[in-house]
Image: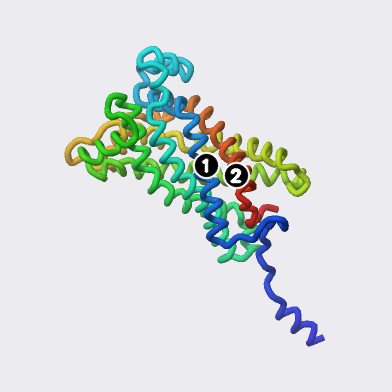
Amino acid sequence: MHSSTAQLQSKPKRPIPVIVDAAAPQLSAAQLYSRFALAGAICCSVTHGALTPVDVVKTRIQLDPVTYNNGMIGGFKKVVQAEGAGALLTGAGPTFAGYFLQGAFKFGGYEFFKQQSINYLGYETASNYRTGVYLASSALAEFFADIALCPLEATRIRLVSEPTYANGLIGGFSKMMKNEGIGAFYAGFGPILFKQIPYTMSKFVVYEKVAESVYSVYPKKDMSDGLQTCVNLGSGLVAGFAAALVSQPADTMLSKINKTKGLPGEGTTSRLIKIGKELGLKGSYTGIGARLFMVGTLTAFQFAIYGDVKRQLGAVGGVEIGK
């Protein structure tokens, strides 16, 4: 009896189950997370780049609601009539480059911090409190992603708001650096954190919860790759709508603060307070229709592309803590 008790007490902790395809080559941690990062970079840059025209119209509606007052379709027509169809691709360079970097840090970082949380807490605790793990991991990943994104997003907004400002990414980036200094690139860092961190937290946790609900009825192991892609699309669409609603006020403030430089001696915090008072709650949701369409669509395709690219890269190792 004592021997049995001792054996039970000395029984090792349950190891963290890593889901690995037996047919796939084993990858080191660095190889695995670099593949997660590349898959994230591809899915974010492709989706955001493809939706550049929608982002141009959305930004114009936010910055000049008096002129662009006929919704997204009307905004498209006005931009094309006034500036030609090419104007819809304004800022495509910084959009692609910025979200390539951001996607690498966001998705790669999310997988990394999720694993570290599980290692620290243990599998059972992490599984029981998985919503907290999803939220904390996505927030940390997005913080580092925004450090990389912010300069390129500031350049994009300046190019969209002032079409004659410069000719493309390199010209706009160089001009802002020369005339306003590096601080101009991070004038919107507060708003971008305020926008992107709640956005990413809601995006990942809603995606995980919706996918978990589907897989609880239709086990993932029984699904074909095509069906899993469909689940990623549907879960991503719901997650995108939630993320857009949560982050819209900060997105509007980000567009406003990057439109022009502040007055001499005016700090970022005072500028944000002034912009917030001018907008009000209703004004902060200007352009929400275009953004719901944009964010819902791109989030759906992001998760679909992310899952497919991971499979193609052989990045099949990972921990799943959903029940």
Percent x, y of residue 28: 58, 62
Q: Quadrant of residue 20?
A: bottom right
Q: Amino acid at mark 2?
A: Val
Q: Position of residue 2 (x, y in %)?
A: 79, 87
Q: Earlier in the sequence, mark 1 or mark 2?
A: 1
Q: Residue furthest left?
A: 264
Please say if 14 is above or below 170: below
Judge the density around disc 2: few (<14), some (14-19), many (≥20) Cα neighbours within 10 Å.
Answer: some
- Closer to the camera, 137 or 271? 137
Q: Which residue is mark 2?
A: 309
Label number found at residue 290? none
Tell me if residue 141 comes above or below residue 180 in the rendering: below
Q: On screen, 163 above or below 149? A: above
Drawn side of residue 256 relative to residue 227, left or right: left
User: Residue 63 appears in which quarter of the rendering?
Assistant: top left
> Disc 1 marks which residue?
42
